[in-house]
Image: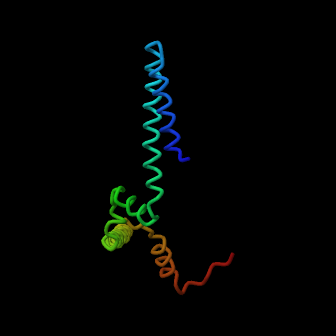
Amino acid sequence: MSKAKEFSDRAQAFEKRAAKAIDLSSREHYREMAAHYRALSVEHREAEQLQKLSQAGFEQLAKRSSTPTFQNADRPTFQRAMVVGIVLCVAFVAVSFSLRPQATDDRVLVKADRLMRTAGDPSKVR
């Protein structure tokens, strides 16, 4: 016996109890329980119908219900946009690196100047 049928039978049982109930609060409670089990029965019937669909049919239904994204809607355009973005990032890094202020290191010039001034002089003894 399927769950949907079982829930439907329980809903009918609660309806019978509601009809036989003496006080108003019990009758309302049984009717609410019957409505709850009817809703569960409908949900389980729908779930069973979805399970009966073929796997391909279920995947198509899932694809239709999901919102399309840029990645899965137009794959070639997405790939081109990613390549252009990466190229622009690399260009930005290259330009930023080349335009950064260079360190002023004149120690090399001082050393070269001293070597030129002392060229040909005898070396000092230590």
Position of residue 36 measured from the top left corner of the image (x, y, whole percent): 45, 32
Q: Quadrant of residue 87?
A: bottom left
Q: Which of the pair 18/92 is nearer the observer? A: 18
At a point 43% along the width and 66% down the height, the residue shown is: 56
Residue most extreme to the right: 126
Q: Which of the pair 50/76 is nearer the observer? A: 50
At a point 50% along the width and 37% down the height, the residue shown is: 9
Does the image show residue 95? no
Does the image show residue 41? yes
Q: Which of the pair 73/44 is nearer the observer? A: 44
**Quadrant of the drawing holding the C terminus:** bottom right
Give the image's coloring scheme.
rainbow
Q: Which of the pair 13/25 is nearer the observer? A: 13
* Vertical order, 65 against 5 (above or below): below
Q: How many marks?
A: 0
Position of residue 122 measured from the top left corner of the image (x, y, whole percent): 60, 84
* Vertical order, 119 against 41 (above or below): below
Residue most extreme to the bottom: 120
Position of residue 75 measured from the top left corner of the image (x, y, whole percent): 34, 71
65 left or right of 50? left
Position of residue 1 measured from the top left corner of the image (x, y, whole percent): 56, 47
